Every structure is written in structure tokens, then in C-alpha cells.
Amino acid sequence: MKRVKTLVGVMFCLCLPFLVTGQNAQQTNAERASQLSTAVERTIKDKEKNWSLLRSYSVGSASSQRWKSGGRELEVRIFVCRSPEEASKRLARDGVFSIALSQKLEGLGDEAGFISSRYFSWVGVRKGTLVAEVQGPGQELDLTKRFAQHALAQLERD
């Protein structure tokens, strides 16, 4: 019985650094998402005077902001991923829920795509391990792209 306790203790000590490192990475990504969200919020408030922030929140390594101007609303989401590959998969998974409508968007970040329909517009941009997604009103792709560019400006500064 003493050998089992000793073995469990040794295994715990060997695994502890990996557990702590994983928690620190999650905490760091959560802090980074919150900081990026604050920077994006400042940029949008500065550049989009007619838009007001309805709500903003962060959960883990993701943040979300809901904006409104008149009868139009849009949402900006920021994700901090562990690797560029994970970020690319997230962008593909979130943006390509309708592959027939999804199109590549050149000239934004490392990778970008958009969907434009009668009911909504969506732009997703990846820069390294960071992803920004903006979902806006239907048939207003230019507006959605503009907000994505505001978010991208902060992702590129990070």
C-alpha cells in the first residue's frame, strides 16, 4: 500500500508542471481575449460614431460584442486559439456552415472568408492564432467588412 501511495505521489509531482502550464495558457488566452476586446471596442467607438455598444462579455479565450445603430445590429467575436492551425480550423468551422455561400476574401489577415445573403452577412478573419468574426445585417457586406477591418487592426497590433 505504501508503494502505491509513493507511486501516486511521484506521478502527481511529474504531472503537476503540465497541469499548471495548461492552466496558465488558458488564463493567458482569456486575458488576451479580454484585452483585445477592449482595444476593438475603443477602435469601433472612435471610428463608428453612430454605433453604440449594447453588451460585451468574455468567456474563456473568446469575447463577444453586440453593436447597434438605428434598426441595424451586428456582433463582433474575438477568439484566441492555441495555434494558427486551431485558429484556421475555427474560422473554417464557424464560417463555412454553408459551404455553397462561403467565399474567400483576399487581402485581409492571414486568411479570411465571407458570406453574404439576404438575411445576414458574415466576415471571418484569421491573423496568426487570433480569429475575428463579424456577423452583420443582410445585404450589408461592406458594413460587416468594415467592422472586421476594425477588429483586424487590433489583431495585427497584438
Image (spheres, grey):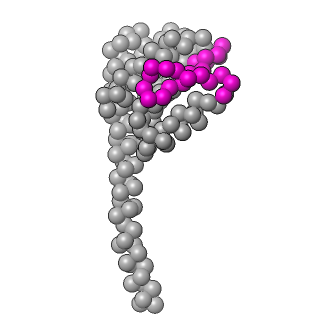
Q: Quadrant of residue 93?
A: top right
Q: Is residue 1 above or below residue 97?
A: below
Q: Is residue 69 above or below residue 53?
A: above
Residue drawn at x 48%, y 28% is 111
Horizontal side of 30 relative to 112 (left or right) equals left
Residue 149 part of the magenta segment: no
- Can residue 137 be seen here? The reply is yes
Residue drawn at x 41%, y 38% is 129
Q: Position of residue 124 (x, y in %)?
A: 51, 26
Q: Nearer the viewer, residue 158 or 53?
A: 158
Q: Quadrant of residue 101?
A: top right
Q: Position of residue 100 (x, y in %)?
A: 68, 24
Q: Nearer the viewer, residue 102 or 2?
A: 102
Q: Which residues are magenta?
A: 99-121
Q: Nearer the viewer, residue 139 or 125?
A: 125
Residue drawn at x 43%, y 43% is 83
The quarter of the image holding the C terminus is top left
Residue drawn at x 66%, y 13% is 118
Q: Position of residue 87 (x, y in %)?
A: 48, 38
Q: Position of residue 33 (x, y in %)?
A: 38, 37
Q: Nearer the viewer, residue 23 or 89?
A: 89
- Can residue 59 be seen here? The reply is no
